[in-house]
Image (tube, helix red, strand yellow):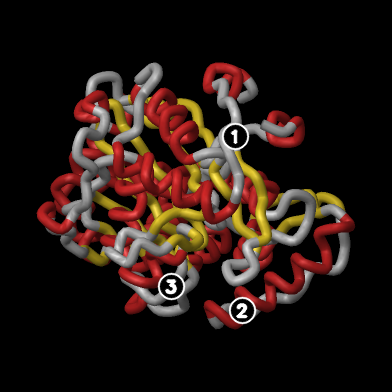
Amino acid sequence: MSDKKKKKKNPNVKWGIALVVEILVLALMIVSYGVFWANEKLNAIQYEEIKEENIVKNEGANDDQKGYKTIALFGIDSRSTDSMKEGNRSDTIMIASINEETYEVKIVSIYRDTILEIADGSGLTAKVNAAYSYGGPELAINTLNANLDLEITDFVTVNFLALIKTIDHLGGIQIHVEDNELLMLNACITEQINITGIYSEGVFETGDLLLNGTQATGYARIRSTDQGDITRTERQRDVLNKMLQKAKTADMETLENIIDDVFPNVCTSISKDEMLALAKGLLEYQMGPTVGFPMAYMPYDHGTKGSILVPADLNTNVAALHEFLFGTKNYMPTQSVQNISIKIQTETGIWPQEIDVEALLNQQ
């Protein structure tokens, strides 16, 4: 693992924190207005069932994960709430794992440029964010399960309208903008305007600035400085932390406006009853540590697939992932994962690195 990587802390918790904020807001509303009111609000969320018989699960996968509820979280580019199921690459991919005994929630951010095998039967590898575009949340879930020995059955997808509107309702957030970020920030603002149709002025100075929703979302999407996607996840963490700080002091009218704008921009396989159950148990949940995946990686210029991140190697990373999520020491990935790992090694020529999970967590 490189020295640069060791210095990076708390990888992207963008949509994971967004989900926690939404559950927190919902819980507050239940206390203030009652379950019936909250139940009506939940009608605005798009529901898509994922049939259990369609879910890929590797034979012999880690039994230790049976006591956990594991949910895939996706953030996508979309102007319309009608196009949240496929056709869009998932700009953000996360895994939220809830220990059903202790209620600890751990978050794993999957770097979008990570090369994995797409679980569509083709046997082809691609950047992991392509799976959502090819086959929506079901294929994206199956790709995560097949490559990582997981047993995810549910998902939550949020588009960028939700992030922009939430920040605007909060009156903007304070962000420190550096000189080397300004050019790409304005390019990303223009991109966000084209995606969402929400106009914003550009940003023409640096330092501590009050950014509106479009500007702050553009800031969170800067990729062409420092370490690219790795550094971008730190910006996203900063944006969400600032959102959390303001949300904690927002009045009830502001929180209700956020719910009204956010919920139509959410698509999930989690039923209303399950969501209400999650909200009622909110006070028992504890946010645990977060990591990025792969934990050990090498950047690689693939040519036809562009700039990618290669797990070094997949076996080593999957073993470390299961130690982080489920406490499993010396986990041996299934034969399915081992075969994918060999395929990626053969394709890229990148071989294993050591991963010290305990040292990784001590950095946080």
Q: Classify mark 2: helix, strand or loop.
A: helix
Amino acid type indicated by mark 1: Asn
On the image, the x and y values in percent for residue 244 come to: 54, 43
Numbered circle sitting on residue 227: none
Residue 88 against residue 243 in the figure, above or below = below
Numbered circle sitting on residue 88: 3
On the image, the x and y values in percent for residue 291 come to: 53, 34
Give the mark nearer the N terminus: 2 vs 3: 3
Residue 278 against residue 356 in the figure, above or below = below
Res 324 seen here = yes
Which residue is at a point 70% across and 54% down the rendered structure image? 228
Numbered circle sitting on residue 10: 1
On the image, the x and y values in percent for residue 30 come to: 25, 44
Quadrant holding the N terminus: top right
How would you rate the neighbour count of disc 3 (Cα within 10 Å): few for under 14, some for 14-19, many for 20 or more? many
Amino acid type indicated by mark 2: Ile
